[in-house]
């Protein structure tokens, strides 16, 4: 049974008080009585009614003072009070509403009007009761949601920041549009000391956008630790997001690797508006425009995964940022844009380039809230021998003397295994088991990677590096590489690694052969011996020659032997 609607009648004239009580009981409600304002206040202190009919003029305490006191101690609840007065003029009506009454009835009381007003107030009270109950539910939901969001933010921040963030030469800034950011700026070092960086920008913002980035982050860190090539990361992340995300959801991303020793930047850009290498004076030296669709849109068969490399020869900074920064608008609706980034850097010079961009963006917004998540990463890159290399070696690890004294590893990759393009990560696993660490690990892997990639690209796939010299050459080269690799039916690369140790020398012997037709290795070796090999696409070969105590091509050039001194 529903509780009765209770009306308190505060009226000093007994016949009027009882007559109103009869009308209220006829409506099916409960009635409480008070002969003056003091009794009305005392009754309300004991238990509040649902409604009060308050005479304005009563002995002991009038209706004005009684209403003021009742309003004070029940301020957190709406209690309808209807004033009763012999005055029927407009001024009396207005003054009663100003004092705190919710309605007004003139005496003598029109009982039909009284019943109608009670019904109206009852409906309002019921609605207020429902609103109050809903408000309590909403407050409870809000408190639970806040706790869950704080927990989710802690977990997400822990996952995103689980790898090394304090890396040499790297600085970053992020400003989310909501509590959760749909942007992720992740970085880690590969086993060879290369810096791997990923800027991922999920559609939308908030918790759903942040969750969409998690699979990309997880795969990025796992593959960076194992030394997978940049394009393999892009393919794997795309395949995972394509399976997990609903239609209409995707992740724009830029994947970047920086090899300080080779002085090389490699970039895959799928939907990120700003990836630039900029000199200290603000001159744009290289821009990697988005050439590929964002991650998660296409399945594995349709996904494009080429990359573009750049060898820097001038000191500057690599800048990467999400569209939340470039599309930040001022009061006139003008976007900050890549031009704003370059202008900021030209004013910054050599000092604090990231702070220069950050302050310029905030000044551009002029106190307005950013409508999209903002992410900015800046990597300082110096020309020539980079002092960062020593600090990178500390991150990768030092030689621990735990190498095996004698070992031999033979590996052979057929066409199906070459198509999977995962040979280098497999080699990294072997080198880890053999006990190679730190700079020694990086140098051995650099040698093997360079020789293996040359054998695959130029031997098995018969690609010509001169393609890269043409307009859009890098894009054409990697498209052709992908097409030939996907269509590869016959091909072989064999690798022998062996530690040779005697009284005369201690080295790692490397022999690699492929099923290709070979090349003019005599001219290559002659240029290397004379230190005349400076082609931008062949710096890796020169580096291998410099690291090895012996480098010899045999036959037609499809077999090479090298010795790396330990």
Image (cartoon, rainbow, N blue to C red):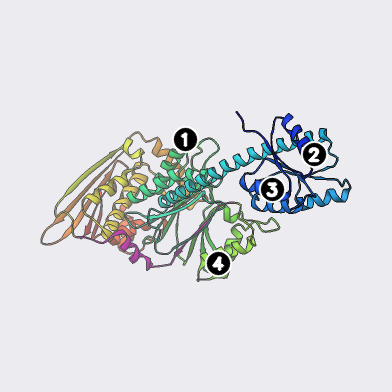
Of residues 332 and 509, the one nearer the viewer is: 332
Which residue does the numbered mark 4 point to in the structure image? 356
- What SS does tag 3 mark? helix
- Residue that appears at 61% across and 30% down: 2
Give the CA distance from mark 4 to mark 1: 40 Å
State which mark lies toward you, 1 or 2. 2
In the rendering, at what x and y percent does residue 271 appear?
54, 47
Q: Is residue 280 magenta?
A: no
Q: Name the residue tied to disc 1.
A: 299
Q: From where the camera sits, is residue 519 visible?
A: no
Q: How far apart are marks 3 and 1 (CA)?
A: 79 Å
Vertical side of 248 occupied by 39: above or below: below
In the rendered image, residue 392 lying in the magenta stretch gets the answer yes
Mark 4 or 2: the one toward you: 2
Image position of 147 with respect to 194: above or below: above
Res. 39 mark: 3
User: Magenta stretch?
Assistant: 372-400
User: Where residue 21 sits: x, y (%)?
Assistant: 74, 35
- Of callouts 4 and 1, which one flags the residue occurring earlier in the amino acid sequence? 1
**Label 4 vs 2, first from the N-terminus:** 2
């Amino acid at each position: 049974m529903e509780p009765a609607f209770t009306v308190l009648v505060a009226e000093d004239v007994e016949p009027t008080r009882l007559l109103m009580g009869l009308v209220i009981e006829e409506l099916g409600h409960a009635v409480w009585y008070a002969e003056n304002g003091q009794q009305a206040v005392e009754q309300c202190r004991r238990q509040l009614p649902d409604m009060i009919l308050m005479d304005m003029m009563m002995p002991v305490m009038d209706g004005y003072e009684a209403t003021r006191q009742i309003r004070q101690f029940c301020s957190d609840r709406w209690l309808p009070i209807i004033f009763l007065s012999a005055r029927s003029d407009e001024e009396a009506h207005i003054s009663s509403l100003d004092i705190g009454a919710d309605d007004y009835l003139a005496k003598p009381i029109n009982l039909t009007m009284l019943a109608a007003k009670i019904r109206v107030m009852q409906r309002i009270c019921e609605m207020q009761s429902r609103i109050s109950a809903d408000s309590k539910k909403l407050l409870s939901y809000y408190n639970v949601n806040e706790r869950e969001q704080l927990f989710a933010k802690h977990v997400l921040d822990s996952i995103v920041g689980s790898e090394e963030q304090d890396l040499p030469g790297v600085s970053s800034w992020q400003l989310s549009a909501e509590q959760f950011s749909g942007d992720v700026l992740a970085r880690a070092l590969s086993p060879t000391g290369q810096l791997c960086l990923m800027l991922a920008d999920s559609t939308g913002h908030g918790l759903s956008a942040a969750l969409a980035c998690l699979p990309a982050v997880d795969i990025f860190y796992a593959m960076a630790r194992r030394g997978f090539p940049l394009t393999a990361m892009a393919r794997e992340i795309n395949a995972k997001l394509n399976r997990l995300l609903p239609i209409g959801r995707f992740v724009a991303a830029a994947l970047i690797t920086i090899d300080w020793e080779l002085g090389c930047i490699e970039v895959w850009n799928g939907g990120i508006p700003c990836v630039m290498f900029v000199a200290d004076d603000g001159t744009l030296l290289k821009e990697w425009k988005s050439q590929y669709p964002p991650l998660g849109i296409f399945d594995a068969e349709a996904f494009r995964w080429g990359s573009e490399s750049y060898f820097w020869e001038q000191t500057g900074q690599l800048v990467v940022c999400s569209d939340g920064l470039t599309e930040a608008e001022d009061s006139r609706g003008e976007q900050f844009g890549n031009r704003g980034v370059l202008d900021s850097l030209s004013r910054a010079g050599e000092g604090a380039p990231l702070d220069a961009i950050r302050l310029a963006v905030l000044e551009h917004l002029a106190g307005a809230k950013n409508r999209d998540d903002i992410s900015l990463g800046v990597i300082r890159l110096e020309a020539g021998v980079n002092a960062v290399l020593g600090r990178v070696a500390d991150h990768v690890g030092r030689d621990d003397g735990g190498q095996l004294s004698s070992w031999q590893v033979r590996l052979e990759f057929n066409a199906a295994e070459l198509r999977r393009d995962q040979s280098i990560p497999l080699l990294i696993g072997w080198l880890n088991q053999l006990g190679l660490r730190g700079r020694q690990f990086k140098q051995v892997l650099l040698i093997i990677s360079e020789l293996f990639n040359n054998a695959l690209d130029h031997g098995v796939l018969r690609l010509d590096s001169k393609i890269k010299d043409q307009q859009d050459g890098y894009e054409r080269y990697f498209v052709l590489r992908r097409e030939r690799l996907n269509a590869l039916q016959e091909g072989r690369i064999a690798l022998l690694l062996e530690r040779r140790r005697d009284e005369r020398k201690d080295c790692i012997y490397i022999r690699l052969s492929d099923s290709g037709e070979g090349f003019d290795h005599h001219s290559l070796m002659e240029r290397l011996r004379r230190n005349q090999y400076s082609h931008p696409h062949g710096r890796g070969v020169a580096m291998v020659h410099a690291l090895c105590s012996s480098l010899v091509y045999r036959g037609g050039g499809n077999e090479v032997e090298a010795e790396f001194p330990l």
